[in-house]
Image (cartoon, rainbow, N blue to C red):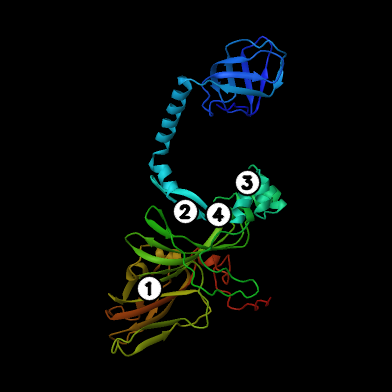
Amino acid sequence: MTAYATGTITLTNGSRAIAGDGTGWATALIAGGVIYPQAAGNPLPIASVDSDTAITAATEWVGASGSYAYALQRQDDANQVIANATALADYIRRLDNETLSALAGLTPEADKLPYFNGESSAALTALTSFARSLLDDANAGAALTTLGVSAFAKTLLDDADAAAALATLGVSEFAKSLLDDADAAAARQTLGAQPILGFSPVNAAIPEMTQTLYVKGWETTPGYGLTRAIVLQQSDVPGSVRAVWRAQERQGYYYSVFWDLNFGNDGRRLEFRSDGSFHVSGAINGSAKNFLIDHPLDPFNRDLTFSSTESPHYGVEAWGIARLEGGRAAVDIDAASNLTAGTWAALTQNTIVASLQNQEGFARLRPGPVAGGQFEIIANDDACGDLVAWRVVADRNDPVVRTLGNAHPETGLLIPEAEKEELA
């Protein structure tokens, strides 16, 4: 039987251990035999083959320690034959399976790589020269070079986290804080931008609204419901001028839209109500103040317009009728006007009886002095019992009239003449 001499052996004086280098003793199915080192010493009968590179000898090495070429003479006996047959049977058993059969059924082709596409099936796939050059690379850096990745990109790919990558990209700390924002609202806050308005803002160069502005939302106070407001404010300084426009519901009574003008600790309101009324706390100034209603004789086709009488007074008037008894009649202006007692006296000053008209006879009439909202009608005939119509006029004297811009703050009388305001 041919001797086995692959590789070299290392021996140690006085040791039974034989170490192999480049040997394959177990793979070669060596079951026993004798090793003859190419050195002065003794042959080494094999006690056991421990692996491809390890054998235990039956006797100790008496020669010098070192590495040597060798020749291994297999034992030519039944043990070796049995070992060879057993190994061969095992190899045949291993080769007899579906996996190897699937690979054996493939016909090799150039630039193709076998792969499994099922539990017991295989196929070929293309393996290009570029892919082979990539597979041949020793490490990731070499692979990236093959892929054409630049040195800068390789530096970026080597970064341990997002912050390091952003630093490599030269991203500023401000930009990194922007990229870290969770949503658009946070990003706008980082940028110092205004929030989403829901409409196109007015262009300062061309201050025109080009879209409809909607103000929605509701807040409640006892007895009232108020929409969100449109606010015009001079500044954030306490006491600055502030105008608020909003709608309200006075629950159970009416709806309205109003402007509130606030200045310092004071304010005024202009209000339109759902009952059609218009409310202001000050004077209404205009070229004319008209009374417009449906014409009572033809309400569907015609209107009726009356104009207010103009006067250099903040005046009020009242009228009524009284029956003379014994040539006299006492007139209570509050009672005749459905007012609480004392109202006329508190409301007015300079009351005069403007007219007395006998409705039934020709007796002459004169008024007595007006005091406390009352006066007396006196006829020249002590027996007269005629019906008399009366009318009184007066200047306002209430606290509100004294606050109006065109009334004297002490007397409450109208100041009818004023210089025009200078134009800005």
Closer to us: 210 or 161 = 161
Percent across and percent down for residue 290 are 44, 82
Q: Amino acid at mark 2?
A: Thr
Observer able to see residue 166: no
Q: Which residue is mark 3?
A: 162
Q: Is residue 228 left or right of residue 329?
A: right
Marks 3/2: CA distance? 49 Å
Report which quarter residue 72 is drawn in. Answer: top right
| Circle 3 SS class | helix
Q: Amino acid at mark 3?
A: Ala
Percent across and percent down for residue 193 are 61, 58
Answer with mark 3 or mark 4, whichever residue precedes in sequence: 4
User: Mark 2: few, some, or many residues within 10 Å (few <14, many ≥20)?
Assistant: few
Marks 3/1: CA distance? 65 Å
Report which quarter residue 231 is drawn in. Answer: bottom right
| Circle 2 SS class | loop
| Circle 4 SS class | loop
Marks 2/4: CA distance? 15 Å
Q: Which residue is mark 4?
A: 127
Q: Which residue is mark 1?
A: 276
- When the figure is inspected, residue 317 is found, relative to residue 48, above or below; the finding is below
Q: Which residue is mark 2?
A: 107
